Amino acid sequence: MRVATVVRGSFGRVRRRPGGVLLAAALAVTVLGGVLVGVPAAIAAQPTVGSEPYLVGRGIADVTGEAADAGMLGYADVSQNTAGIAMRLRARTFVIVDRVSGKRILHSTVDTGLMFQSVHDEVLRQLATRYPHLFTDENVMLTATHTHSGPGGDAGHGLYNVTTLGFRPKTFDALVNGIVASAVHAQDDLQPAQLSLSRSELNNASVNRSKPAFDQDPAADKAHYPDAVDPSSTTLQVTRNGKVDGVINWFPVHGTSMSTSNHLISPDNKGYAAYQWEREVKGDDYLSPDDPSFISAFAQSNSGDMSPNLDLQPAAGEQQFTNTKLIGGRMSAAAQSQVSGPAESLAGGLDVRMTYVDVSKVAVGPEFTGDGKTHNTCTPQLGAAFAAGSTEDGGGGVSLFKEGQYGGNPLPHVISQAIYALDPATADCQGPKDLLLPVGYVPGAVQTTLPVQLVRIGDFYLVGLPTEVTIVSGLRLRQAVAKSLGVSIDNILVQGYTNAYAHYLTTPEEYDTQNYEGASTMFGRWELPAFEQTVAGLGAAMKAGTPVISGSPQPDLMGKQFLSPTGQVLFDTTAVGFGTVLTQPAPSYSPGARVSAVFSGANPNNNLRNGGTFLAVERRDGGGWTRVADDGDWSTRFNYAHDGLTGSVITITWDIPPEATPGVYRITYSGDAKDLFGTLTPFTGASRTFTVN
């Protein structure tokens, strides 16, 4: 018998394809009799759907981009370029499948500054070649941890490549390939699973960096956050074979523990939280093909006004690393405590609604504007306070501009008032913003048609937005979804930095103060109500079981980006030999000390060594050597510096952990040298041995 099976792999765009007989060793390709799309038939047919209603797979992969002379993304500081690696960046991906319906969701938390649709679309293109019809723009959620210490130049819209001095193909490819690799690992890792949700409060890991704006919100909203922070720590737990072997945690705090003075690639506090649990607690080895046995992703939620700098001062020097470990450690500890505490089991399948919205052309109804009138969003513009930056997090901005209305520079105010007098529609939309950068009028500068996503995992709902959402904005979005679905607001989270990027999202009241976040709310005063209206519509469609008009993304502009001229390697030279040790470690050290070795090296951009390492700390083990740390570890730092025009000096440090095993150690450095003809030659150098007593 042949069956015409309706497959909603994209949960809205219906595709039809014939079913057929399934061989036991073949992958199932239809939803038929409980056999699931893209799942080995032997697993899908297991009779434990009631106790384990999901299949879940986990994957992790390296996404570290160029470690030399690449502009970092986040602080918009053209002088902040990569000069080595503090810790490698990673993508952590979970694939969740409902064993009854066959619907699936891919959720990836990526150590990167921002998630651009250019990356999202290329990931989908590559996944489509491996898994036709399984993963679409509707059931894939790619979200950024928002570290400000990763290489940029991976955007498909020009504004975000300005401070990185252009597009960087190597960094883009490293990011995309790593996300895809983690997704493939997750798909291959599918096993029957239970999902549960746990919650707690974390009150000493964030502070409101825009308190004057928050103070303008209504008392009813502020009552939800008496300390002006959102302390909610929410953890989705994956239990397989009777043990928790994966989690996704959401907590709102900026990835700005590392300041603009930092030049080493770092996943910041979110990445440290994941590392601490995976590596230090669980003992997993990122370079081992058998690990990790446990994956912990630390995702963002409504963190637009949440800073990790508890004294509202950007860190400097070693304090940056101290703060990264402090805030990351607290996030990790909160999530770990939830795993040992009460949790709510999830059941009821999966569902997704997603749409592309031209946010520059939304008519927002009276139900959402709050004043009984219809208002319109408009062409995106950035305000004068955008140039002031967020000084609390290290974005010092331009000294001619200050946060707040009419702050620091009268010229934008005078020009804006003239524009508003001539154009009442722009005044209603953008006022009282002092207009500075009309980015929406520059072709290809920013994205205006944006993806908005609503995902249901059992009784848990996740709103995916491409913006940096303040905590009260997140509250109102959750309220809109809760009302449309008829569910508790406690079961809904807003996840920013998802699938694309469009700057900040503030409440209209916060917008009026024109702090940095309000000036960066590009589509004007009614942008949040427009998103509230959109997510309420998605919720209503999900409740009714009806599809939505998904719309279409904006055209791909990747081929039109200017290539960055920095960090391009012509060839490498050395006077003493690649890998030669220029400065040796001391003969012996005690735990807690810092070991240092300096090598004559090559440009690390020649070979990013994704999935590998530039360095290894090794302990003598019988007649061989055992690696105890690499450039993915917190204890090491890989520093790059120029030596003339074509030479490189590599400084490697290792902070000896207190629990280090006494013995004989060495530091090795591996690189790839490029000759005049572009040929790469790998090499390795090793320091002399030293003892740890």
Image (tube, rainbow, N blue to C red):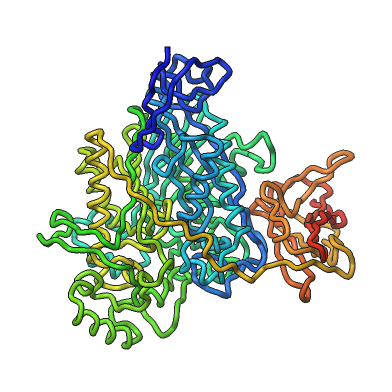
Residue 138 found in image quarter:
top left
Is 658 located above or below residue 597 in the figure? Answer: above
Q: Residue 153: x and y, percent?
A: 55, 63
Residue 689 found in image quarter:
bottom right
Residue at x 55% of width, y 44% of height: 126
In-image side of 541 versus 654 (left or right): left
Is 327 located above or below residue 214 in the figure? Answer: above
Residue at x 22% of width, y 48% of height: 480
Q: Residue 226: x and y, percent?
A: 27, 57
Residue at x 32% of width, y 72% of height: 515
In this rendering, the count of numbered labels is 0
Q: Residue 466: x and y, percent?
A: 38, 55
Q: Residue 683: x and y, percent?
A: 83, 55
> Residue 272 or 648: which is nearer the viewer?
648
Furthest residue toward left = 372
For residue 58, say whether it is visible. yes
For residue 203, say whether it is visible. no
> Residue 372 or 31: which is nearer the viewer?
31
Residue at x 29% of width, y 63% of height: 360
Furthest residue toward top = 1
Residue 344 found in image quarter:
top left
> Residue 497 or 478: which is nearer the viewer?
497
Q: Quadrant of the N terminus?
A: top left
In-image side of 596 versus 485 (left or right): right
